Image: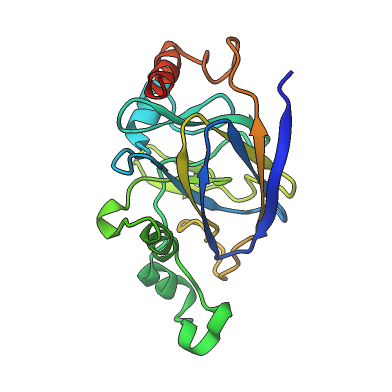
């Protein structure tokens, strides 16, 4: 049975952002405190920032259009950055967009920092730019992401529809880092959430030291492509 050692934990308020280098052999558990959270996340190889999360390869390799326990998050170099080792939600959105300043103002009204200070309405794009800027990255480095805790349905016309109530209070998802991974986290609402009010939800972050994946690891053995992805990640550290 895997063991874990808590390193630190904190609460991330709604509309806020956070960046952390999730070292190989550690994990991040995100808990939806009140239900209805949306947590956009994007990933980079911290040691080689040009290597980053690739949505297309992540879905193609695992023959899926959503993410849950057992799935891996691939880089654009065929390595596994993180794997989803625990999930009580069952569906996380890897294909939806994220909010921008313009989309937030159009949907919720202008609510800027100059007038409202810490109660201003932020957007995922602005928060991502702020966090990646701390590591020397810029707008050209913005890339695909995952909207954790959110679910979309796609109809026969190709239109995407937000599914309310996908995540309940106390639901959680855990990411185990297979490389030294820069994780950028935001807590702004999903842009397709029909709620007309700006009500981003807080989440609890828990960072732990965990065992290396065993030979019978669920994520490693989900499909032949994941076995190859884990080997690629392990060879990177030889």
**Residue 103, horizontal then vertical, whole percent:** 39, 68
- Is residue 49 left or right of 154 when viewed as pictured? left
**Residue 50, horizontal then vertical, whole percent:** 28, 42
- Is residue 114 left or right of 176 when viewed as pictured? left
Q: Residue furthest front?
A: 238
Residue at (41, 46) in percent of width and height? 145
What is the quadrant of residue 202 in the picture?
Answer: bottom right
Residue at (38, 19) in percent of width and height? 232
Considering the image in quadrants, where does the C terminus appear? Answer: top left
Residue 63 in view in this figure? no
Q: Residue furthest left?
A: 140
Considering the image in quadrants, where does the N terminus appear? Answer: top right
**Residue 155, horizontal then vertical, whole percent:** 41, 40
Q: Nearer the viewer, residue 152 or 28?
A: 28
Whether 42 is drawn above or below 175: the answer is below
Q: Nearer the viewer, residue 236 or 56?
A: 236
Label count reads 0
Residue at (36, 45) in percent of width and height? 144
- Is residue 10 left or right of 73 when viewed as pictured? right
Residue at (29, 52) in percent of width and height? 141
Q: Nearer the viewer, residue 4 or 83?
A: 4
């Amino acid at each position: 049975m895997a063991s874990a050692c808590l390193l630190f934990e904190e609460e991330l308020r709604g509309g806020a952002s956070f960046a952390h280098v999730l070292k190989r052999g550690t994990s991040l558990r995100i808990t939806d405190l009140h239900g209805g959270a949306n947590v956009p996340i994007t990933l980079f190889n911290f040691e080689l920032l040009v290597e980053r999360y690739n949505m297309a390869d992540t879905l193609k390799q695992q023959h899926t259009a959503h993410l849950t326990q057992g799935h891996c998050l691939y880089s654009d170099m065929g390595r596994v950055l993180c794997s989803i080792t625990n999930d009580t939600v069952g569906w996380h959105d890897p294909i939806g967009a994220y909010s921008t300043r313009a989309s937030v103002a159009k949907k919720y009204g202008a609510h800027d920092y100059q007038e409202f200070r810490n109660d201003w309405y932020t957007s995922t794009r602005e928060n991502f730019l702020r966090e990646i800027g701390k590591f020397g990255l810029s707008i050209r480095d913005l890339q695909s992401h995952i909207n954790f805790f959110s679910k979309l349905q796609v109809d026969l016309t190709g239109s995407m529809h937000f599914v309310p109530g996908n995540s309940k209070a106390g639901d959680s998802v855990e990411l185990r880092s297979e490389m030294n991974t820069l994780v950028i986290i935001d807590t702004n609402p999903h842009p397709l959430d029909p709620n007309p009010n700006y009500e981003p939800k807080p989440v609890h972050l828990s960072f732990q030291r965990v065992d290396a994946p065993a030979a019978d690891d669920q994520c490693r053995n989900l499909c032949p492509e994941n076995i190859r992805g884990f080997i690629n990640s392990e060879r990177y550290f030889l």
